Amino acid sequence: NAGVTQTPKFQVLKTGQSMTLQCAQDMNHNSMYWYRQDPGMGLRLIYYSASEGTTDKGEVPNGYNVSRLNKREFSLRLESAAPSQTSVYFCASRRYSRRSYEQYFGPGTRLTVT
Amino acid sequence: TQLLEQSPQFLSIQEGENLTVYCNSSSVFSSLQWYRQEPGEGPVLLVTVVTGGEVKKLKRLTFQFGDARKDSSLHITAAQPGDTGLYLCAASLQGDAGNMLTFGGGTRLMVKP
């Protein structure tokens, strides 16, 4: 049981390049999330998918697109990378437990845009 | 201004000391969670509190949810170097379907041996 996995772990892009961050979970959770983490800003929600076939914008969606490929996989795409997108990206999945929703995070992708 | 304010932002203490970290808001939450994040890794859930006034203990860590469900605290007794990390609180707004969690800015704790 690997939990939430993310690839790649590190990536360096030039401004204007595109890339896709991959995320998969093996816990059979319905909901999945993409966050970015910047120093002093905590975690900010980019996009989420409440269930297979649905996606919704979070707090900071501009410059990103997502695809919920199936129940296990949720990818994040940067079409034209900008230096402001330099960050650590975390994928998470969610389950309902003890009257609350609990999120489980992957190890992160560290992205630098030059 | 963040919806969830954590204090202090940084804390450096000696092994064996006690400490308290705070998470405050003007909004009412249906539930609140505490996570710990170590360098190079994702956040790991420590505890969830859902009832106003609730107190939960996890070994040397004590978590409390405010009576009005607007704030929470994390108290660590006799801190150890293994407690070093970034502590994040996160909450679901009351009435929200629970689809979105709001995170505080975090408290970075360093425990020196």
Image (spheres, rainbow, N blue to C red):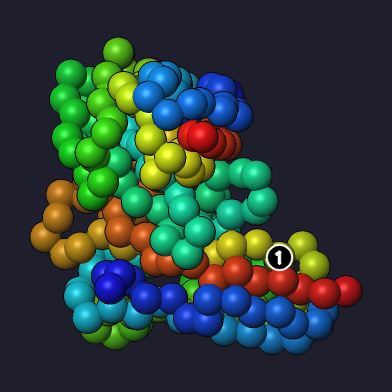
Q: Secondary structure at mark 1?
A: loop
Residue B14 lies, with reference to residue A15, above or below; the image says: below
Query: What residue is drawn where x is 52% and y is 81%?
Result: B8
Q: Which residue is mark 1?
A: B84
> Given the image, on which type of amino acid does mark 1 rest?
Thr
Left or right: B20 as drawn, with respect to B3 = right
Up-down relation of residue B43 to residue A57 (above or below): below
Left or right placement of residue B46 versus residue B67 in this view? right
In this view, B104 is above or below A70: below
Rendered location of residue A80, percent (x, y): 33, 25
Q: Residue A16 versus residue A44: which sits nearer the camera? A: A16
Left or right: where does residue B95 sit relative to residue B18? left
Residue B50 pos. (x, y %):
31, 66
Residue A92 in view of the camera? no
User: What is the crowding at mark 1: few (fewer than 14 residues within 10 Å), some, or many (at least 20)?
Assistant: many
Residue A57 in sight from this viewpoint: yes
Extreme-top residue of the structure: A69
**Chain of the residue that carries numbered disc 1 in the rendered image:** B
- Extreme residue in the left direction: B95
Residue B85 figure quarter: bottom right
State the image quarter where residue B26 is shown: bottom left
Q: Quadrant of the N terminus of chain A?
A: top right
Residue B67 location, quadrant? bottom left
Name which residue lies at 82% across and 74% down: B112
Rendering coords of residue B64 (x, y %): 44, 78
